[in-house]
Amino acid sequence: MIRIQGIVKAAQIARSQLQAGVPPSRLVSFQEFIQETLAQIEKICANANMSPAQLPTPSRKAYEFLAQIDLTNLPVASQNSPSVSVQPIRLKNIRNQQQQVLSAIASIVAHPQNSHSKKQQLLKNLQETVATIEGICTQQNATPAQLSKTSRQTYAWMKFLTDESNLERHLSATRRTQKLAEEMLWSQMQHPCKTITVEFTNITHLYKGKIGPLEAKAQINEAFLNAPDEILAVLVRLAFLGKNQADSQAIKEYALSEDYSEVVLEVDLIADTEAENPQGKCYNLDRLFHTLNREYFGGKMVKPRLSWNRSFTTRKFGHYERGRDRVVLSISLDSDRVPQYVVEFVLYHELLHKHHEGKWVNGRLNVHTPEFRQDEQKFRKYKEADQWLTKLASE
């Protein structure tokens, strides 16, 4: 199966422009951009003796989105409407700022006796840094979605950690993994390194590791912060002692889990939400919320912030951010081929996260409690919606 780079990004750019409205001066260039992108995709597929329907799911869905755009009836922005930023915003020294955060986390883990005051100072620094970045974006009539890839990833990671519960989970995972790494390396290496460092951060890889004469260092994807100790131990072995089939398979399986996807989506959506606009191409989340609120919550739920994200997803279709009281749904659902009851079910599921408090079990937060599952099954078309989503995730 071939992979064509840039399809999903092209669809995201197109969707952002359609939401903002296409400036009259850019109508022709926007039409040409869509036509040329579709022609290029179809040519690559033809050369590979396949159709766009056989592309990997994210690419196929992005292609389908581009193909259904009515180029003869585009939404036109008013002369005063801001257009989508063409040049990404690059932030100077953001990697240095990220390293300062990681160093502060390492200090908290290494010296737990003053951890509370250090954690509060770290939270304050993170909040100030994030506010500064958002201020820069506002001054340029943009959102964090217009940051360059590196800046956007780092901003999203720092914003994620401004939620105190996320920071606490991050510290716990770092602390446990650091201990596992020290126990493993100091017991198995004939000449142990003087320094062992473990960092959780928003990297594209699952993990990275290297061992030198003085230092052993591993970077682990932030999405593993909910992982149990046995998975963290596997990551340490892979990062420092080399690959083996059993460990690699265990990590790949965990990376397909809901616990992993939940964090990936939460971090990605922080900067990927172009603007908090509940009106999608097909569905309005405000209207769906009011229907669900009357039917299942007696009209007593305070409406959270509601928005569509800009990314096509294949397994996870919604997320509730308790710290921001925000529900974000995947634009994979904002299609006339997806029944309304399916979109309502995903929104209802996320509203249940707002309604129910999770429970801590063995150091891990369980958000899908028995009470949660009981309420979830009260949805009027629970089985049909669940089957539809299972089918959608497997396409």
Image (cartoon, rainbow, N blue to C red):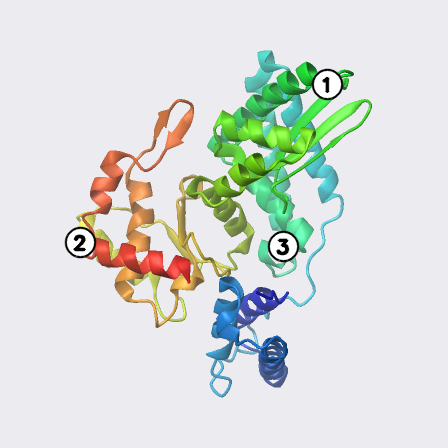
Q: Quick one: label 3 or label 1, which is nearer the N terminus? A: 3
Q: Element under label 1?
A: loop
Residue for point 32% across, 54% down = 347
Alpha-carbon span between mark 3 and mark 1: 48 Å
Disc 1 marks a residue whose amino acid type is Met
Q: Which residue is mark 1?
A: 189
Q: Would you say 17 lies left or right of 296 here?
A: right
Residue 14 lies, with reference to residue 113, above or below; the image says below
Q: How many angstroms separate mark 2 from mark 3 (CA)? A: 40 Å
In front of the other: label 2 or label 3?
2
CA gap, disc 2 and disc 1: 62 Å
Residue at the spot of label 3: 137
**Other-residue count near label 2 (Cα within 10 Å), few / some / many at <14 / 14–19 / ≥20:** few
Residue at 69% in and 57% down:
89
Query: As drawn, which residue projects farthest toward the top?
Result: 113
Q: Look at 80% across and 27% down and name the residue there.
A: 212
| Quarter of the picture holding the C terminus | bottom left
Q: Tag count in the figure?
A: 3
What's under tag 2, amino acid-wise? Answer: Glu
